[in-house]
Amino acid sequence: MAVWLKTMAALREPGAAGAGDEERTPALLRLEGLRKHFGSVRAVDGVDLAVRERELTAVIGPNGAGKTTLFHLVTGAQRPDGGRVHFAGRDITGWPPAAIVRAGLARTFQITSVFPELTALENVLLPCLARDGDTARFWSGWVRHRSRRTALEILDRVGLADQADRPCGQLSHADQKLVEVAMALATGPRLLLLDEPAAGLAPGETERVMGALREQAAAGSVTVVLIEHDMDLVFAIADRVVVLHQGRILADGPPEAIRGNPAVKEVYLGGTFAGTAAGRP
Amino acid sequence: MTVDRNGWTWLALVAAAALLPLGLREFHVHLLTEILILGLFAAAFNLLFGYTGLLSFGQAAYFAIGAYACGLWLKGPWPSLPLGLLLGAIAAGAAALAVGFLCVRRDEIYFAMVTLACGQLIFVALWRWRDVTGGSDGIGGIPRPPLDLGAAALNLAPTLHFYYFTLAVAAAALYVLWRITRSPLGLTLRAVRDNHRRVDYLGVGMARYRLAAFGVSGAFCGLAGALFAPYQGTITPALANWMWSAEPVMMTLLGGPGVFAGPLLGAALITLLKDFVASATEYWPLLVGTAVVLLVLFLPGGVGGAVRDLVVRWKPAGGLAIRPEGPAAGRLAKARAGAPAAAEAHGAREEAI
């Protein structure tokens, strides 16, 4: 446990944005008054948020706080009722999901979503082909395609090279999560939104998934925003924690500040918040 | 250009198909021609069904459009069979793109219903547009103009000659379809089949690829129909009816949607079964239906899937076996139980090449 917490802490180093950086680095993702209501439920209710490049942001909050809806609005899965989404200097509000991905904003899903009957390699190959603009090629075989080597490299980076030819549906849950991370990375994103990357994983498996992510963050210039319920994980890796409550941002700041924030403790019913951090096996 | 193992398989199969009619009576050569045409029809249907995960109940409409376009062209002032085939394929492909535009965003039963409805619409149009299509009488006396080969002309009237012409066209068309299934596009289509909600989040616009598959499938169904017009000599609106749409569905289920050759195999089995049983009893639909039900129940991967599983079991070291368990059992509900095997075969071939 202690060992992987240390590895997680290392993840913060490459992305740690000092106070001086904040003015200089422009926001990669900027949300302005983002709103989504379902009937009387205000799932996302006026969220303003700026994510700077190479920053690792964790979005936390109780169930139903609007975290996943926020991701849906940013990635084009749902249309916001109001507000704008700016990404890399462009207004991407209302863009179709595929165009948003091509602009460099990728995501993974809370419930692991892969292509179960395709092999692990084919799963990762598809976004590689899409990035190269080759998905419509119908005459050349993909077996010798240049994207194939890229896909194998990415699979290797998440430690799944030996599973490349197995159908994804036959892999373990943790491996499928890793394949999904590999798929997202294969789109060549500048910003990666991860919806509960550690959900349903044993601590050792979490370490594998997050370790792979850490390497990616260190190697490239991938900015990560993640939704996570595992507080140990959040406080170990995040540069910045955003607390969402009833569709609004309740608190936003470095982990230390959030840990001591009385309003946040209140939302998490006092003891539960501290308890999650300390009481995990 | 080197010929790899797949290339040899293709050459061997075409050679076998070329030698097959030599010892047969004319009637059976006629039957073989029909198998090729219907096999192409079913294979084109399976690009949608087995590879893209879309069950269309309206493919007969594109078959009929191909048949009518070719038939009318052959009865026109410049009868040329290659042009007629091209015209049939293009007309059917264009119609499929128009219908596809309406239905590719629908899933499962809704997709099937929209294709069925649009197919019936085309059926009614062919039936009612009497001035052009001849109404319920259809078009009769469609000629088989000789094939201009430059130095000489090949008379296509004899059954055997027309068989070879059909073989050449069907083999070329099947080869194109087969190349598509192994291409990046084929991989994309299989991904759409597996999880169509996911591909958009990898930068692949799902609807466009479904539409592409629908258009290509429609064009090849049209090509099959265009071959059918001079083959039969007479075409009627019944070719566009939903009953005719069920043919490739049955053939594909029987032959195995997860194997590329499955639909062709299914076309052969059903055509032969119909012929042999019909010569014995007038209750032949009952027997054919029973046979199909039994095969689908007990061989969920189809005959083609069963054959492939046997091959895999026999040569586990030959690079063909990655997954000995083969197609997941009990996937009949989705009716593409053999589909994973296609992925398997693809993955395996890369080692062989």
Image (spheres, coloured by chain):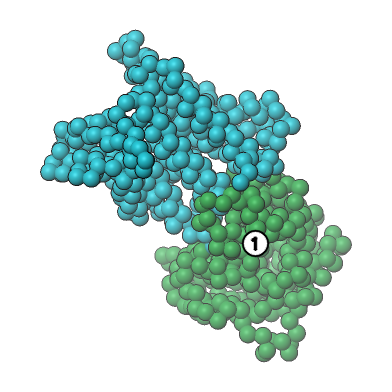
Chain colours: A green, B cyan
- To which quarter of the image does residue B134 belong? top left
Return the x and y of residue B70 as percentages of the image width and height. Answer: 27, 42
**B133 on left or right of A281:** left
Query: Badge 1 is on which residue?
Result: A186
Compared to residue A260, the image places residue B241 above or below, namely above
Neighbour class for label 1 at 10 Å: few (<14), some, many (≥20)? Answer: many
Compared to residue B160, the image places residue A243 above or below, namely below
Return the x and y of residue A275 as percentages of the image width and height. Answer: 75, 63
Image quadrant containing the C terminus of chain B: top right
**A25 on left or right of B249:** right
Residue type, mark 1 in image: Ala
Identity of the residue drawn at 73% across and 47% down: A163
Return the x and y of residue A21 as percentages of the image width and height. Answer: 71, 87
Residue B223 visible to the viewer: no
Q: Furthest-left residue in view?
A: B131
Return the x and y of residue B219 as percentages of the image width and height. Answer: 37, 46
Residue A254 visible to the viewer: yes
Compared to residue A217, the image places residue B146 above or below, namely above
Identity of the residue drawn at 66% across and 49% down: A120
Compared to residue A152, the image places residue B27 above or below, namely above
Identity of the residue drawn at 22% across and 34% down: B142
Q: Chain of mark 1?
A: A
- To which quarter of the image does residue B78 belong? top left
Judged from the image, the secondary structure of the residue bearing numbered disc 1 is helix
